[in-house]
Amino acid sequence: MTHDEQLARQNTLDMNDVALAIADSAYWSYSNSLSGAAGGRHTTAHRYFEWSTKPYPGQLVVEISARRKPAIDRVGVLESITQEPVQDWDNPELNGPPPLVTIWTIRCLDGRQMRWENCQFIVAPSRRGNFSS
């Protein structure tokens, strides 16, 4: 097994983690829909929203702005969020360095690494009650 294959295997979630993430996501979607149907801004629902929209490396994430892409490419463990110069920047009207773009790198469930830009990620719960931390 190559070094890359070993890293991919280490960073791949087991099926129990995947099932738990799906179950918890469904539960919180249901709970938040009840909160919205009641017409109020429920404190727990708001805390969940705030937590889920600020992912950091090591968390299980889902890319939500490219829904037509295969799900297997949009779900994984966030490895890094970096700022990199725009590639092939060629604008003679502007002097100076190219603008920066945010690059999100995830390790997909099947072990592949994916890089994303111009995207939006949310955190998927991966153990009960972890959105409060």
Image (cartoon, helix red, strand yellow):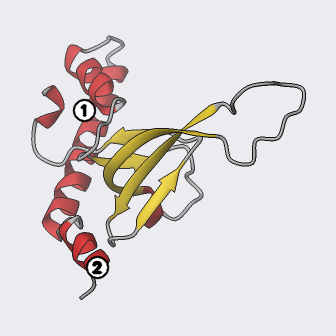
Instruction: Pick out the residue farthest to the bottom.
Output: 1
User: What's the residue at 69%, 33% (across, down)?
Assistant: 98
User: What's the residue at 56%, 60% (across, down)?
Assistant: 69
The quarter of the rendered structure image containing the C terminus is top left
Q: From the viewer's side, name the closer residue of 101 and 22.
A: 101
Counting residues from the N terminus, which is met first, the one under dot 2 or under dot 1?
2
* Quadrant in the rendering for residue 46: top left
Instruction: Pick out the residue farthest to the front.
Output: 96
Q: Amino acid at mark 1?
A: Ser
Q: Is residue 56 above or below residue 42?
A: below
- Mark 2 burial class by Cα count in 10 Å: few <14, some 14-19, many 20+: few
User: Number of marks in the image?
Assistant: 2
Camera-near label (2 vs 1) is 2
Q: From the viewer's side, name the closer residue of 79 and 93.
A: 93
- Mark 1 burial class by Cα count in 10 Å: few <14, some 14-19, many 20+: some
Instruction: Pick out the residue farthest to the top.
Output: 40
Name the mark on residue 101. none
The answer to whether one can see residue 18 in this image is yes
Label 2 and label 1: CA atoms lie apart by 39 Å
Measured as percent of width and height from the top left, residue 71 is found at 45, 62
Q: Which residue is mark 1?
A: 31
Q: Say left or right for 132 vs 113.
A: left
Name the mark on residue 5. 2
Q: Is residue 25 above or below residue 98?
A: below
User: What's the residue at 89%, 32% (across, down)?
Assistant: 92
Q: From the viewer's side, name the closer residue of 121 and 48.
A: 121
Q: Secondary structure at mark 1?
A: helix
